[in-house]
Image: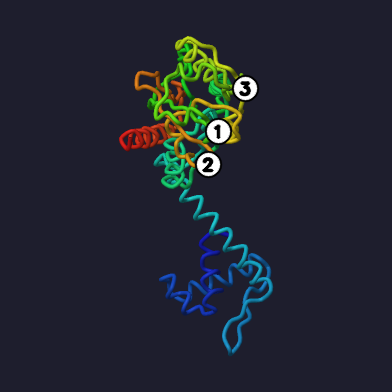
Amino acid sequence: MELRHLRYFVAVAEELSVRRAAERLHVSQPPLSRQIHDLEDEIGAKLFLRNKRGMQLTDAGKFLLDEARQILGHSERAMRLTNAASRGEAGRLSIAYSAAIFDPAFSQAVRLFRTRYPFVELQMRELSFSLQLQALLDQQIDVGYVVFGTQPTQKEFAFECIRRVPPCIALPQDHPLTKKKTLKLTDLANVPFIFPRQSMSTFRSWLMELCRSAGFTPIIAQEGDNAMGILGLVAAGVGVAFTPDTGRIFSGMGIEFRSLPPTTPQFELHTIWRRDSTSILLPAFLKLLRETSNSSSHRK
C-alpha cells in the first residue's frame, strides 16, 4: 500500500463518487477505479457499497478513512518538518536561564522565536550559573542566559554580554525611603534586605560587593529563591531589594521603585554556549535576543 492509494481512497470516500474524485485529483476515472479495487483486494475487504443510489462506505471503509486521514496528516507534517529542518527552522533547542532577575527582553525573544519557528521544540530550564556551565559541558543545553557570571576560563565556552541594565531599589510602598525621589547606596546601610539565596551565588556575591563598596554590609532579613519571590517579600513589607530597572513593571503591586546614581555598576546579562556547538538554531535565537535587548534599551 502506497500513500497515493490512500490519497485516492480518501478522495473517493469524501466525494462518494469516482467521477468527482477523479476531477478533484486530476486523473481519469478508469485508473482511479482500478486503484480502489486493487486496494480492496490488498486489504481483503470491501470499502464501498455500490448501488443505484451511488456509493456508500462500509464499516471497514469508515475505519480506513479515519486511519488514512491520520497517516496522510503525519506524512504531510513529516514533509514540512523535514523541509523546515533543511532550512534550519526545525529541531530542538534547549535554553537555560537564571531566575535571579526578570528580563522582559528575554521573555520577548523566546515568544518571538516560538512564533517564527513553530516546528522547533523549545526546552526551557531554570538553572544557576554554575549548573548552566555543567549542563553545557554535558551537552544537556545549547545556551545559557545568566546574570553577571565571571567569564569561565574554559576554552570550550563562548560568552557574550547581551546588555547592561541599571539597578534600582524595590521598597514596600509604605517604607520611609519612598519619600526620597532617588537613593544613594549609603541610604541602605541600616535597612533590612531581601537577598537571593546562596544557590544564586554569582548574583548574591555581586550584590554583597556592591554594598561593601559603599562602606556597609547589608542586613539580610530574608532570602528569596527567584526574582518574583523576592519582590513578593518586598510587597509584604519584609525588606527592600536590589532589582534591575526592568522590575519597574511591577510598580503598584505594593512595591515602589527608586533609582540609584547613574555611576552605580549595572546588571550585566550574558549568554553562554559551547564554541563547538553544531546547533543551526542557536544563531537564530541569539540574533533574536540581541534584537529584543537592543529594542528594549532604546525604549529607555
CA neighbours of label 2 inside 10 A, class few (<14), some (14 to 19), many (20+) = few
Name the spot of residue 231 as percent of width and height, x first: 55, 33
Q: Residue 28 occupies which quadrant of the picture?
A: bottom left
Q: Is 208 placed left or right of 112 in the picture?
A: right
Name the residue located 58 percent from the left edge and 58 percent from the top edge.
Answer: 71
Reading the image, the residue beneath label 1 is 231
Q: How is the image coloured?
A: rainbow
Reading the image, the residue beneath label 2 is 253
Secondary structure beneath disc 3? strand
User: Do residues under tags 2 and 1 come within 8 Å of each other at their CB atoms?
Assistant: yes
Secondary structure beneath disc 1? helix
Q: Is 272 placed left or right of 48 in the picture?
A: left
Callout 3, which amino acid?
Ala
The CA distance from mark 3 to mark 2 is 21 Å
Query: Does label 3 or label 2 sit earlier along the sequence?
Result: 3
Q: Quadrant of the N terminus?
A: bottom right
**Tag in front: 3 or 1:** 3
Q: Quadrant of the C terminus?
A: top left
